[in-house]
Amino acid sequence: MGQKVVLFSDLSGKIVEDGELVKIVVTQHPALLDGPVEIEAAPSELSAIDDKGIEVVSFEVHTPGEPPRTVVLPLAEFDKLATDDPMDVVLKAAKKSYAKPARAKATGEPKINYGSLEHAGKPHRGKVNDTEKQIIRDHLDQVNARLAAEDLRLIDLSDPEIVARYGLEELAAERAGAAQPAPATVAAQDETAALVNEE
């Protein structure tokens, strides 16, 4: 005896006759409490979205002393915020942000983003991602100054384990090479030492 699978649309609750559903991942909606969700619908139910869809910009506003808030604006409204140069010029000239939206842990505390200049290099059990490695390579002295101020272990380029963890082999070699005197300087030092010994 055969079996027939009946598919229903999450949007309309109707049976989808052609047996094909489209997956929709809702990433932002006021009703979402725990991050993105997936729903399914019949392709025909989504036929009008291209006509009704608008281009939007999603951004975070970081006000001192307040938690960041996410704002979504129509693209045209966002572009109007730039009054000196066009918005595309402003964005091309802007510095790269390593900040990622904080996600809540099961405890309700925000997750620490080690891929940010504020937390990169702090000891943690998780895997070191490429963003954290890049920040440490580009800002090692700044990261070490922050770690020292927080009384945490420093990123020591003479420690092979730390060098391997953060992918700092090239930087360690560069700094080790810069710390050693050039061959001509070594020869001059040897010559001076020989003269002193002869006296």
Image (cartoon, rainbow, N blue to C red):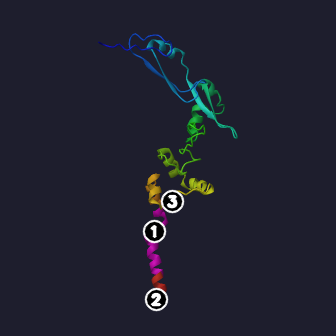
Instruction: Tell which tag, 3 or 1, sits nearer the viewer.
Output: 3
Q: Residue furthest front?
A: 1
The residue that disc 3 covers is 156
| Type of amino acid under label 1 | Ala
- Distance Cα–Cα, label 2 vs label 3: 41 Å
Taken as a whole, is the magenta stretch helix, strand or loop?
Answer: helix
Q: If you read the primary sequence from the N terminus, does the residue marked by circle 2 or circle 1 appear first? A: 1
- Distance Cα–Cα, label 2 vs label 1: 25 Å
Magenta stretch: give its range.
175-192
Q: Residue 183 location in percent, x, y? A: 43, 70
Q: Residue furthest bottom?
A: 199
**Is residue 150 a member of the stretch shown in magenta?**
no
CB atoms of marks 2 and 1 within 8 Å: no
Q: Identify which residue is drawn at 60% across, 32% down.
A: 59
Q: Residue 22 location in percent, x, y? A: 44, 19
SS label for mark 1: loop
Point out which mark residue 182 bears.
Answer: 1
- Distance Cα–Cα, label 3 vs label 1: 23 Å
| Type of amino acid under label 2 | Glu
| Type of amino acid under label 3 | Asp
Q: Residues within 10 Å of mark 1 (few under 14, many from 20)?
A: few
Q: If you read the primary sequence from the N terminus, does the residue marked by circle 3 or circle 1 appear first? A: 3
The residue that disc 2 covers is 198
Q: Identify which residue is drawn at 44% across, 59% down.
A: 160
